[in-house]
Image (cartoon, rainbow, N blue to C red):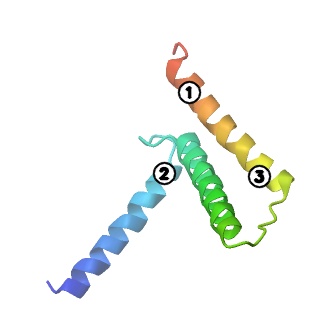
Amino acid sequence: MTGRQEAGYKTINFIMSFKEIFKTDNTYNEKTIIGFLSFAVMIIVMLADVISGAMGKDLVINEFTYNSFVLVTLGSFGIAGLEKFAERK
């Protein structure tokens, strides 16, 4: 098997494993994934703001957009945390 074929198989396996996230019986917590991605976007925007501020330029961030990411992050991690520590029946 050549390196190109092996890379193709890895790509197909990745796509197939990505589809597993959307099944009802998986091991991934989708709320945590969404929360992490939202938090990562907030960090990237804040780093861009610091870098643009250091360069003397103003990065205009809509307050509504930023607050939306904050709410998504807190909501996702809050729900995931409650599910983890709540009593299961």
The residue positioned 80% from the left and 55% from the top of the image is: 65
Dot 3 crowding, Cα within 10 Å, few <14, some 14–19, many 20+: some
Task: Judge left or right: residue 2 versus residue 66.
Answer: left
Q: Which residue is mark 2?
A: 21
In the rendered structure, which amino acid carries the disc numbered 3? Tyr
Instruction: State the residue in front, 20 or 56.
Output: 56
> Residue 64, image x and y in percent?
85, 52
The residue positioned 57% from the left and 54% from the top of the image is: 40
Instruction: State the residue in front, 81 or 24.
Output: 81
Instruction: State the residue in front, 85 or 21.
Output: 85
Q: Earlier in the sequence, mark 3 or mark 1?
A: 3
C-beta proximity under 8 Å, tags 2 and 1: no
Q: Which corner quadrant of the image does residue 83 belong to? A: top right
Circle nearer the viewer, 2 or 3: 3
Dot 1 crowding, Cα within 10 Å, few <14, some 14–19, many 20+: few
Q: Earlier in the sequence, mark 2 or mark 3?
A: 2
Residue 81's mark? 1
Position of the N terminus by quadrant? bottom left
Dot 2 crowding, Cα within 10 Å, few <14, some 14–19, many 20+: some
> Residue 25, image x and y in percent?
46, 40
The residue positioned 80% from the left and 61% from the top of the image is: 61
Task: Judge left or right: residue 59 versus residue 2.
Answer: right
Q: Which residue is mark 3?
A: 66
Question: CA separation, marks 3 and 1?
Answer: 22 Å
**Local secondary structure at mark 2:** helix
> Residue 35, image x and y in percent?
60, 44
Q: Earlier in the sequence, mark 2 or mark 1?
A: 2
Q: Which corner quadrant of the image does residue 75 belong to? A: top right
